[in-house]
Image: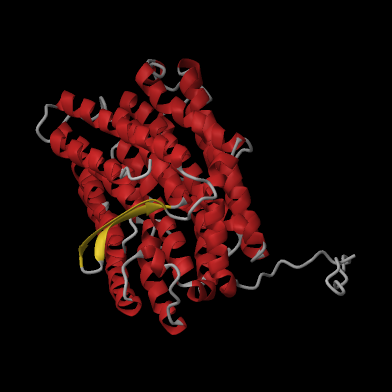
Amino acid sequence: MSGFPILSVMLAVPAFAAVACLFLSAANARWLALAATLVDLALGAVLWSQFQIGGPQWQFVENVPLFGSFGWSLGIDGFALLLIELSVFLMPICIGASWTSIEKRVPEYMAAFLLTELLMIGTFAAQDLFLFYIFFEGGLIPMFLIIGIWGGANRIYASYKFFLYTLLGSVLMLVAMLWMVNQAGTTYIPTLLNHDFPVHAQTWLWLAFFASFAVKMPMWPVHTWLPDAHVQAPTAGSVILAGVLLKLGGYGFLRFSVPMFPEASSYFVWLVFGLSAVAVIYTSLVALVQSDMKKLIAYSSVAHMAIVTIGLFCFNRQGIEGGMMVMLGHGLVSGALFLCVGVIYDRLHTREIDRYGGLAINMPRYAMLFMLFTMASVGLPGTSNFVGEFLSLAGTYKVSTTITLLCTTGIILGAAYMLYLYRRVVFGVIKSDDVAAMPDLNARELWLLVPIAAAVLWMGVYPESFLAPMRSDVQILLDRIDRAKPAGDALPTPGKAVAAPAHGGEAK
C-alpha cells in the first residue's frame, strides 16, 4: 500500500457519490449510495489488513501543503483505525435500513448520508488541527438535515436543539485552537501531541475543548438534545447518531484533552467522574420509566457514554482500553437496538411499549436477535459490551473506589430497564389483532441485523483483535500523561504488608 492514498480515496468515494445521487432517480440513488458505502467498507477491510500492529504510530500518512501551515494532512493510529472501521461497517446498514421506509426526496437523503460518512472518516483521519475542526463541525450539517427533513412530527424543534447545543460549545473550542496554533507555531496534530502547553493555560484550553466534547458525548447535564434527536430522527439517522457521532466526543477527549492538557485533565478528573456518576444513575432511572422505546435506548446511551468518560480519564491502561472498547461495543449494540425498534415501527407505526407484547409468538427470529442485543447492552459476558465495561470499571477502581461503586450500579439498572423492555415487548400475550398480524423479519432485515450480531459476538469472544491495534498507542499515551497521573484511593488489602526490596532484589 506504499504511496497509495487510501484515506483520500475513502473520502473521495462518498463525496463523488453524494454529488451524483442528486442527479439520479430515487431507485438509482439508493443503489449508488449502497455501492459507495460497500466500496468504503472494502477499503476499510484493506486498511485494517495493511495496518502494522506495533509499527509506526502514524500510518497511511498523506501531507499536501495548501496555504501557510494549513494542509491536507491525513493519517491514522490504532484509535482512529477502529473508529473508521465502525463507521464504514455501519454505513451500508444505514442505507439498507432506509431502503423502503424513506420515500420522499430520496436522492437528497442518500447524499446526506454519504456526506455524513465523508465527514466522520475525515474527523478520525485528520492530522491538521483546522482540518479536524472542519470535519468535526461539518458533521452537524447533514445530521441536522436528516432530522429536520425526514424526522418525526416534532422534527424542527429537535433538529434546532441538536444544532444549537453542539455548535455553542464548538465556538469556544475554535478560540482555544487559534491560541494553541499561535503558541505552538503549528497546526500539525502529531507535533501538538508532544508540545507542553503552559500549565496555567491548560485549564482554560481544557475547559474550551470540554465544552464541545461534553455536548457531543453527551455528558450530563448537556445531554437533553439526545433523546429529542433520537425520537424524531428516522431509524437510520438514530443508528449513525448513536453508533458513530456520539463517539466523536470520546475521540476528542482521547486525541486532544488528555494528551495535550495532561495536568488540566488530572486537575478536572473529579469533575468528569462526578458528572459521569450522576449520568449513569440519573439517566438509568429515567430510562426505567420511559414509554417510548427510542427514548429509553437514547437515555441508555447517555449512561454507557458515562462509562466511556470515566475510563478515558483513569490515566491507566485498563481504563483507556475499556473506554475505547465501550465506544466500539456501544456503537454496534445501540445501532442494532435502534434497527430493532425500526423493524416493528415499520409494521405498526408506533414506538409505544404498551402497544406491543407477545412478539415471540409470531416473530421468533426477531425475538432471538432482539434478545442478543438486549443481553449485549446489559453487558453479558461473551458479548461486546462486557469487555469494555469490565476494563473501564477496573481502571476506575485504581483511581476511585467510590466512583466505581456508583457507576457499577449502572450495570444493575441497565439490566433492569433493558430486561423490563424486552419482557413487555416480546413476552406475554398478544394484545391486538394488528400485532398478531405482524410478519417476522424478511431477508433484507436479516441482512441488516445478522452482521451486527456476528460482530457483537466476535468482540465478546475474541476482544484481542480489537485491543491489539491500539495497544502501542495506549502505551504512548500513558508515557505522555504519566507525569500528571492523579493519586488513587484504592488501598492495599489490610494485613498484606510488603517488605521493601533491598539492593535491587525482589520484595518477599
Q: Residue 128, percent across and down? A: 31, 61
Single out the residue that lies furthest toward the bottom.
200
Coloring scheme used: secondary structure
Q: Is residue 490 left or right of residue 212?
A: right
Above-or-below relation of 352 to 314: above
Determine whether, in the image, residue 140 is placed left or right of residue 25.
Answer: right
Q: Is residue 217 visible?
A: yes
Instruction: State how many labels appear.
Output: 0
- Could you tell me residue 473's position as x and y percent? 52, 56
- Residue 220 in view: no
Which residue does the image show at 83% across and 71% down from the upper left?
504
Please report the residue visible at 50 percent of the width from the left and 65 percent of the height from the top. Answer: 275
Judged left or right of residue 23, residue 223 is right
Q: Farthest residue toward the front?
A: 2
Position of the N terminus by quadrant:
top left
Compared to residue 303, the image places residue 185 above or below, namely below
In this orientation, which residue lies closer to the viewer: 274 or 51?
51
- The quarter of the picture where residue 85 lies is top left
Residue at the image point whose x is 31% and y is 68% from the top: 187
Q: Quadrant of the C terminus?
A: bottom right
Q: Quadrant of residue 182?
A: bottom left
Residue at 43% over, 82% down: 198
324 shown above or below 503? above
Q: x%, y% of residue 78?
A: 48, 50
Is residue 483 rendered to the left or right of residue 230? right
User: In this view of the protein, which residue sits in the foreground, 431 or 91?
Assistant: 91
